[in-house]
Image (cartoon, rainbow, N blue to C red):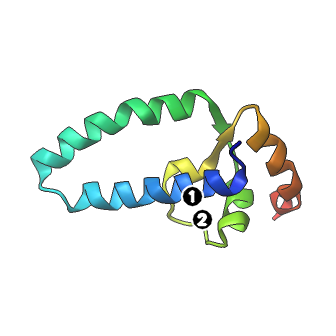
Amino acid sequence: MWNEYDLCAALTIRDYLDVAIDMLPIALAAKVSEYVRGPDSRFRAVTVADSGNRMAAIAQVDPTGRGWWWYRVPDSGPILEDLARWDRFESE
């Protein structure tokens, strides 16, 4: 079962993917970006907008300048329930 730390790890991996795409030649970056659109769309479909404060607290990072994926959380399920433990960071 995934928890909030697994989501944090997945978001970090997505960060690395974004950095890697930026390092590619333009034509190849466009192709890879096209492949990433599908999973990104799926992620958007099963998540909702979020302040990013809880995930930043979990990851112990500053969310400023992070990708859009750091500002989305699951719309239901166990990870959303786990995130409730971090709600105190929503008031920041």
Q: Quadrant of the C terminus?
A: bottom right
Mark 2 secondary-structure assignment = loop
Q: Would residue 43 appear left or right of 55 to someone viewing this image?
A: left
Image spot of residue 19 (x, y percent): 33, 61
Residue hosting label 2: 63
Task: Identify whether 81 is placed above or below 88.
Answer: above
The answer to which image quadrant residue 37 occupies is: top left
Q: Nearer the viewer, mark 1 or mark 2?
A: 1
Q: Nearer the viewer, residue 64 or 81?
A: 81
Residue 16 appears at what percent x and percent y? 39, 61
Residue type for callout 2 = Pro
Q: Looking at numbered disc 1 in the image, what kind of residue is underneath it?
A: Ala
On the image, the x and y values in percent for residue 17 come to: 36, 55
In screen coordinates, is 13 left or right of 5? left
Circle 2 Cα neighbour tier, 10 Å, few/some/many (<14 / 14–19 / ≥20):
some
Label ID, residue 43: none
* Residue at the front extreme of this rendering: 1
Badge 1 element: helix
- Residue that appears at 12% across and 55% down: 25
Q: Which mark is residue 9?
A: 1
Is 67 left, or right, of 91 in this rendering? left
